[in-house]
């Protein structure tokens, strides 16, 4: 009886192993037989050996991917992979590689660098970026909030703002301008010296002097015209940048004070959609701590009318002047 059971389990194990092997073979065949972004010249030019990419520690999870710290070529890296449930999906793989293709086109010291793309089969595709060892800006600001760090601008926070504005100016001034479309504190990474770089181009698109209508991004950082389903352009990024300037100033998440007032006065918390409707109507605005040239820039960046917002280059100039006058 014992021998019979062992044979049955061995048979099941063998069948399972065969099933996994067949699945991997099918996936590999699918990549060879169906055209996808893995055939794209930009992607293939950045291909690196999959067996040299080693994951170490889980860092975070997003809408369709998860990020690990790891090692490639003896250097620390960030490794982005598809979520386990989507790793066998050709459509998701193509969407996933769009970010890599977008990142491969960029070369700027204030944008997280793409190191390469690696795969043996569809199920193990990964995108490898430089590793930023200081975490993201949102985590830093949350720690400031918890420790009651002084609100307002200092040179460190002004420099972070300057770095991100450099990145935006670069994106918007390319021959085919790129709109990030998801600029927020979570997508600003830092090194140990608090030097900042912009990341996460999963929903970024080339603008080509046209306007867009598809609403994407994170709602609390979203420009009114995007939230309302109207046409928008690079000025939507400027609104999001203004939201980040508010975060840098007061440390809290966008509209946190408005949510708190609603809880205390009405006993309910405003949902994001209700908040953004108030913003679009000009009833609610972002919080800044005190009059300051950078806070003034933040206020104009979050103007409801996109035409009243500065360009990235104009915002960059104002930041440079403010830093020179205040901290030079």
Image (tube, helix red, strand yellow):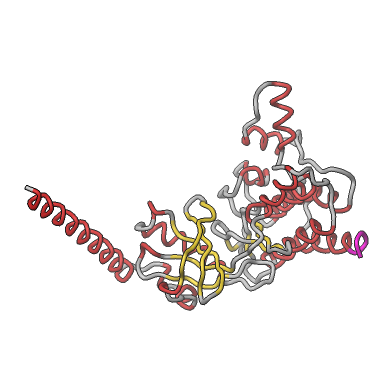
- x 72%, y 24%: residue: 264
The residue drawn where x is 65% and y is 43% is 220
Q: Which residue appears farthest toward the top when viewing the image?
A: 266
**Above or below, comparing residue 295 to residue 90 in the picture:** above
Q: Position of residue 300 (x, y in %)?
A: 81, 49
**Mark count:** 0
Foreground residue among 256 and 320: 256
Query: Given the current orientation, which residue lies at the most extreme front position?
Result: 2
Q: Is residue 209 left or right of residue 72?
A: right
Is 254 magenta? The answer is no
Q: Is residue 40 above or below residue 229?
A: below
Task: Read off the magenta span.
Answer: 324-328
Magenta-colored stretch includes residue 327? yes
Q: Nearer the viewer, residue 43 or 261?
A: 261
Expressed as whole percent of the image width and height from the top left, the position of residue 33 reads 29, 69
Question: Which of 130 and 178 lies nearest the eye of the viewer?
Answer: 130
19 left or right, relative to 190: left
Residue 128 lies, in percent from the top left, at: 51, 68
Residue 297 vertical position relative to residue 72 in the rendered view, above or below: above
Q: Which quadrant holds the C terminus?
A: bottom right
261 or 140: nearer the viewer: 140
Q: Position of residue 225 (x, y in %)?
A: 66, 45
């Amino acid at each position: 009886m014992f021998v019979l059971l062992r044979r049955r389990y061995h048979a099941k194990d063998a069948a399972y192993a065969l099933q996994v092997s067949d699945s991997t073979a099918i996936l590999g065949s699918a990549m060879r037989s169906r055209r996808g972004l893995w055939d794209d010249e930009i992607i293939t030019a950045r291909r690196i050996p999959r067996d040299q990419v080693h994951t170490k520690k889980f860092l975070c999870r997003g809408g369709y991917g998860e990020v690990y710290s790891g090692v490639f070529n003896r250097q620390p890296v960030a490794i982005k992979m598809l979520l386990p449930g989507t790793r066998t999906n050709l459509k998701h793989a193509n969407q996933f590689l769009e970010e890599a293709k977008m990142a491969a086109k960029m070369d700027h010291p204030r944008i997280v660098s793409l190191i390469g793309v690696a795969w043996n089969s569809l199920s193990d595709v990964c995108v490898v970026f430089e590793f930023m060892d200081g975490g993201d800006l949102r985590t830093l600001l949350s720690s400031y909030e918890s420790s009651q760090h002084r609100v307002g601008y200092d040179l460190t926070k002004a420099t972070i703002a300057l770095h991100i504005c450099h990145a935006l100016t670069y994106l918007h001034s390319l021959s085919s301008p790129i709109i990030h479309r998801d600029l927020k504190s979570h997508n600003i990474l830092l090194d140990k010296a608090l030097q900042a770089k912009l990341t996460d181009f999963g929903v970024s698109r080339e603008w080509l002097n046209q306007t867009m209508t598809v609403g994407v991004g994170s709602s609390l950082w979203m420009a009114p015209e995007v939230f309302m389903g109207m046409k928008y352009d690079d000025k939507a990024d400027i609104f999001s940048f203004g939201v980040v300037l508010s975060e840098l100033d007061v440390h809290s998440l966008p509209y946190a004070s408005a949510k708190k007032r609603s809880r205390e006065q009405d006993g309910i918390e405003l949902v994001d959609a209700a908040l953004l409707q108030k913003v679009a109507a000009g009833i609610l605005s972002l919080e800044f701590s005190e009059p300051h040239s950078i806070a003034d820039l933040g206020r104009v960046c979050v103007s409801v009318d996109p035409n009243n917002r500065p360009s990235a280059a104009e915002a960059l100039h104002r930041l440079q002047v403010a830093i020179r006058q205040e901290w030079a």
